[in-house]
Image (spheres, rainbow, N blue to C red):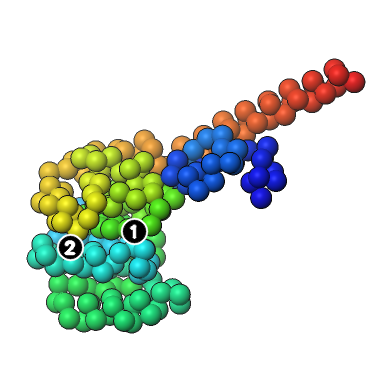
Amino acid sequence: MFQTFSEVPVVSVSNAQRRPLPQANWIRTIDHGLPENLLVPKAVNHDYLAVLGRIAPENGVDRAIRIATRCGIPLKIAAKVDRADQDYYNELIRLLIQSNPLVDYIGEISDHEKSDFLSGAIGLLAPIDWPEPFGLVMIEAMACATPVIAYNRGSVAEIVEDGVTGFIVEDEMSSIACIDRLSHLDRAAIRRQFEGRFTVRRMALVYMTVYRSLMKMGESRIKLASSAE
């Protein structure tokens, strides 16, 4: 499709998203955004690690469990299980949860529950093992002023600012090494990073800029075509 319609302009949500399709007519990368006050920091204790999203092999929930267990820190998992991932849950994750008193499987939660859930976390674990094109859960954590520990896959390095909004790591051992450093990060600064980079208002304004640019290009082509006639 991108070869057939090679002149059609395309926007990416990350530079990582472009890698499988270098032939596409990419014109800009625009980060996803969230409504500024959809998720907000809450004044609660930070006493567990968190997993949010889907229980799936590529999201590494088994790795998150091992990381938290090695650190002796409770882990709360707020995630759904899609039908395609039911075997992974039944054959591996369920056993890890049932055999580990540190793990609390909450299940899928709604947006209005996420602020309390994420605010109470020492950090969000995202030990992903696939080329994530964006990763909304990471900016959801930042909206709640919660730092992220994520594997260096896909767009992670474009979203997480290492040492500011979290830590970018390569494996379980480097994740474990960063856990104690989470408390040294400025949670207010994490929220400011979210407000500056990942609000839906900012996203919409950048899209408007792109649309206006494309409209001007279209008008210029029409004028050139008219003058040629």
- Image-quadrant location for residue 95: bottom left
| Residue type indicated by callout 2 | Ile
Mark number for residue 129?
1
Instruction: Check disc 1 and report its element: helix, strand or loop.
Output: loop
**Distance Cα–Cα, label 2 vs label 1:** 15 Å
The quadrant of the picture occupied by the C terminus is top right
Q: Is residue 137 visible?
A: yes
Amino acid tagged 1: Asp
Which mark is drawn over residue 95? none
Above or below, 192 against 174 in this view is above
In this view, the residue in front, 72 or 201, is: 72
Q: Is residue 113 above or below residue 209?
A: below
- Neighbours of disc 1 within 10 Å: few (<14), some (14-19), many (20+): some
Give the residue displayed 44% in from the left and 50% down from the top: 133
Q: What x and y, as percent, mark residue 140?
A: 35, 52
Residue 122 shows in this picture:
no
Q: Nearer the viewer, residue 82 or 139?
A: 82
77 shown above or below 201: below
- Mark 2 — residue? 67
View extreme (right): residue: 229
Q: Earlier in the sequence, mark 2 or mark 1?
A: 2
Q: How many marks?
A: 2
Hey, which residue is sitting farthest top in the picture? 227
User: Residue at point 50% right, 48% down?
Assistant: 20
Q: Residues within 10 Å of mark 2 (few under 14, many from 20)?
A: many
User: What's the residue at 40%, 42% (across, down)?
Assistant: 198
Residue toward you, 4 or 193: 4
x%, y% of residue 212? 63, 30
Is residue 58 left or right of 98 when viewed as pictured?
right
Placement of 66 over or under 200, stated as above or below: below
On the picture, is 51 further left or further right than 135? left
Is 143 placed left or right of 203 in the picture? left
